[in-house]
Structures are given as structure tokens and as C-alpha cells.
Image: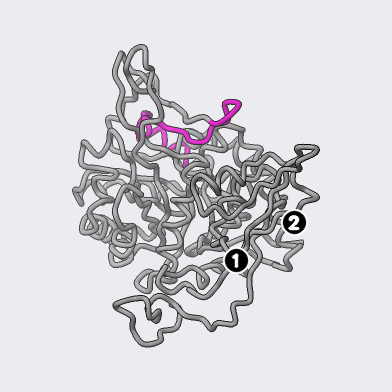
């Protein structure tokens, strides 16, 4: 049976599933219930200086799919609204009671070295396994010069990270904001400051929807609203890209990554790990479905690893990184063509409409003159292999993209004679 235990920047964990710094980790009661359910670790909800932050009501909103499925989750909640002393006391007790579980303490303070130097020994005294610097919170705290206001300035990221490394022996994990043009810049700065790891992504600036009667966005606070932090399954594609960018960047290659963003099942976790994450953090899925979802995550990941022959997490961590490259290095001579399995086709015509109206008019609609029955066939010479028909088809596996033997060698855009700035042959990066 696969071994789910990991070691992340020197921290041992019984499995790679940690709860992210958020409402599910805001007090001992929650954390103990999470550990009882089987989570390998938690990142305690962000601590700050006293007096504690004050939150508003209400705080959450959502972007829904069909049948009110929550696709994206928005919050305007701030860091802990409980005193520093109470939090530190509870962290100490929980770590004492659960020595085999990981507790990382999230911190957010103004950019004053004295404040960081004062709090770090207090956190270290709890027995916590590490600290996470919250440089990503996109609302409320940036107006006070914290959170994303720090994470968006690489020089600040490096500066505060270095302060922390100089004032604690604990591993320092830097949590990055996605609200930035190039996430590699703060990641490089974190490494330059001595960070032991980075975690990403934090939440994305968002407004989910409006009340068109009151003409105000949700969540509504006394007739007004503000942008909040977006998370949940909708942000997973963004998070995967940013994790991959850091994992394959020569300047940050090898820097441990804790993957966050839309992880709701074992497959999501496996994808983050394959793109370079050493562990994963979960928030929204736990808020919507409860702590016991970790049971399915552990079971599913273990079964998949057994099926693939992976005995440990490290055996496939980062395995997809070499296959992730820049567009210019993709093979211009590679070709796929859509193929419709007529036995599985339900004749809905969605592929035809999508291709006819918005793509390349490469699917023919054939109508029997007698019965009126419809059949859809791919016009191979017109198909460019864009995948749109496969995506719109409601029957999984009915339409497949079949590789074609073009008889042409690998050629990327830097080598393509159609490129006015073509270079001499360069192998894929």
C-alpha cells in the first residue's frame, strides 16, 4: 500500500493534506476535529498584533453553477479576531496533544522588524512546526500595509522574509498573492530572503455577483460591499499555472512548494503534486463539505498511487514539470483530429453547433431524407484539432482527439520558417 507520509522543508507529516489558514483553523476546537478526521496538518488562521482585527457581517458570497453548485467562493473576512494570547495558548496545547500532526502558524504584521522579532519567539515557544508569512490577503489588510500590499512588492517580500529567518529557527514558508503580473518575482524574492518554502495561491480579488434590486454586490454589509478573496474549484487552473511557473523557473527550481487553490479531491491533490507541490492545503472544500472529506482524499490518492506503482509521494512529485514549457517550444508539426464514436453519440448536435458557429466548420450534419435521423461526422481535412467539439460533447469519451502521423520532425516556433524571427534549432526547454 502506498505511503502517504511526506517531509516538507524538514517537517514530517503523516500525509500531504493540510488545512489552509482560514476559518476552519481559527481555534483549537476546529483543529482538534480536523486531526480526529485524519488531516496531516493545519496552518493556523493568521495571527497578528493586538488588539485583534474586527470582522464585519456578512462575510461570504459564492459564484454558483447549475443546481446551486458552488464553483467559486468569496470572502471578506480578515485575520483572526481573537487575541494573540488565546491563540498561542491553544496552539501550545493542541501541539502537545497531537505531536504527530503538523501545525504551521500563519503571521501577518506591519513592515516593522521589531514587531516580527517580538512575535516569533512567542510562536516558537508553542512548539509549532513552522511559520507561514501571509503576503497574500487581498482585502482589508492591504489598506493597512499588510497582506497583498507586501506580496505585490518583491523587495518587501525579501526584506520581511529575511527578518524572520534572522529571528527564528523555525522553517519559514512564504504565502504568495496571485494578484500580481508575474508570480515568479515574489517567489524569487522569497528565496533570496532565505525562505524555506513558498505556498500558493492565496485568494484572488473578486466580486461574485450583485443584488440588482439593491444595486449592491454580495456580501452586503449595511447596504455596501467590497471586493473579496476568491477561492474554490474555480481558481484551480490559475493556481496550477502559478505553481508550475515557480517549479520550472531556473531561479526557484527546487524551492519547496505547498500547493493551494481549489483542491477538493484526491485527483486535484495529485495534479498539484505532479506540478511540483510537496504538500497541499485545502480550505473551501472543507468549509462546504466538512473535515471528513480528507478520508476520500487519502483513500483515492493511495489507490491511484498503488495502481500506478508509486510507493511514495516523492516518486511523482514534480513529474509533470519537465513536460510544461513555453508556447514557443511546442511542436508545430504535431497534429490531432477529432473522431466521433457513433455508438456513443446521442445525436444532440452540440459539437456541430459549436464547430459551425464558432470554430472551423469541420463537422458535417447528415440528415437522412426518409427518417430525418441526424448523424455527425468529422471533415478530417478541415479539422485543426482545437478540442472544442470534445469539450462541448456531453458524453465523456464519445469524441476523442486522435494523433496523426504527419511524417514531419519536431519543429518549434523559434525554428519555424513562417516565423519572421526564427532562430536556429533549439531543443524544448
Name the residue located 74 percent from the left edge and 46 percent from the top edge.
345
Mark 1 or 2, nearer chain start: 2
- Which structural element holds mark 2? helix
Name the residue located 20 percent from the left edge and 41 percent from the top edge.
145
**Residue 213 located left or right of residue 156:** right
Q: Name the mark nearer the viewer: 1 or 2.
A: 1
Residue of label 2: 303
**Residue 35 located left or right of residue 152:** right
Per the rendered image, the range of residues in magenta is 65-91
Q: Is 224 rendered above or below residue 281?
A: above
Q: Position of residue 287 (x, y in %)?
A: 54, 33
User: Can you tell which quarter of the image residue 255 is in?
Assistant: bottom left
| Residue 95 in sight in this render | no
Name the residue located 59 percent from the left edge and 65 percent from the top edge.
381
Q: Position of residue 331 (x, y in %)?
A: 49, 74
Q: Position of residue 33 (x, y in %)?
A: 61, 35
Q: Mark 2: give few (<14), some (14-19) or many (20+) Cα within 10 Å.
A: some
Amino acid at each position: 500500500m502506498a505511503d502517504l507520509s511526506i517531509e516538507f522543508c524538514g517537517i514530517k507529516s503523516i500525509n500531504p493534506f493540510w488545512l489552509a489558514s482560514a476559518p476552519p483553523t481559527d481555534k483549537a476546537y476546529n483543529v482538534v476535529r480536523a486531526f480526529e478526521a485524519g488531516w496531516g496538518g493545519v496552518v493556523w488562521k493568521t495571527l497578528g498584533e493586538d488588539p485583534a482585527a474586527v470582522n464585519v457581517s456578512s462575510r461570504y458570497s459564492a459564484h454558483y453553477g447549475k443546481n446551486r453548485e458552488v464553483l467559486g467562493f468569496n470572502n471578506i473576512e480578515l485575520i483572526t479576531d481573537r487575541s494573540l494570547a488565546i491563540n498561542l495558548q491553544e496552539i501550545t496545547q493542541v501541539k502537545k496533544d497531537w505531536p504527530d500532526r503538523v501545525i504551521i502558524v500563519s503571521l501577518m504584521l506591519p513592515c516593522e522588524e521589531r514587531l516580527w522579532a517580538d512575535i516569533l519567539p512567542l510562536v516558537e515557544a508553542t512548539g509549532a512546526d513552522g511559520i507561514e508569512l501571509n503576503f497574500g490577503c487581498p482585502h482589508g489588510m492591504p489598506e493597512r500595509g499588510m497582506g497583498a500590499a507586501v506580496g505585490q512588492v518583491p523587495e518587501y517580500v525579501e526584506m520581511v522574509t529575511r527578518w524572520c529567518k534572522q529571528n527564528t529557527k523555525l522553517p519559514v514558508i512564504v504565502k504568495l498573492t496571485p494578484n500580481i503580473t508575474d508570480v515568479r518575482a515574489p517567489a524569487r524574492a522569497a528565496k533570496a530572503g532565505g525562505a524555506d518554502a513558498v505556498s500558493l495561491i492565496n485568494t484572488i480579488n473578486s466580486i461574485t455577483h450583485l443584488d440588482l434590486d439593491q444595486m449592491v454586490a454580495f456580501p452586503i454589509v449595511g447596504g455596501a460591499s467590497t471586493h473579496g478573496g476568491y477561492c474554490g474549484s474555480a481558481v484551480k487552473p490559475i493556481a496550477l499555472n502559478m505553481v508550475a511557473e515557480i517549479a520550472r523557473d531556473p531561479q526557484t527550481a527546487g524551492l519547496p512548494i505547498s500547493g493551494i487553490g481549489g483542491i477538493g479531491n484526491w485527483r486535484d491533490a495529485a495534479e498539484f503534486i505532479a506540478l511540483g507541490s510537496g504538500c497541499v492545503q485545502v480550505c473551501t472544500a472543507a468549509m462546504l463539505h466538512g473535515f471528513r472529506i480528507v478520508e476520500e482524499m487519502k483513500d483515492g490518492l493511495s489507490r491511484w498511487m498503488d495502481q500506478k506503482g508509486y510507493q511514495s509521494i516523492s516518486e511523482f512529485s514534480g513529474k509533470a514539470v519537465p513536460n510544461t514549457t513555453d508556447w514557443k517550444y511546442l511542436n508545430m508539426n504535431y497534429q490531432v483530429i477529432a473522431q466521433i464514436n457513433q455508438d456513443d453519440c446521442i445525436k444532440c448536435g452540440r459539437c456541430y453547433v459549436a464547430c459551425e458557429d464558432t470554430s472551423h466548420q469541420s463537422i458535417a450534419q447528415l440528415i437522412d431524407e426518409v427518417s430525418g435521423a441526424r448523424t455527425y461526422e468529422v471533415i478530417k481535412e478541415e479539422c485543426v484539432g482545437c478540442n472544442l467539439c470534445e469539450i462541448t460533447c456531453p458524453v465523456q469519451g464519445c469524441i476523442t482527439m486522435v494523433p496523426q502521423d504527419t511524417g514531419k520532425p519536431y519543429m518549434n516556433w523559434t525554428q519555424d520558417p513562417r516565423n519572421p524571427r526564427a532562430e536556429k534549432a533549439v531543443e524544448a526547454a
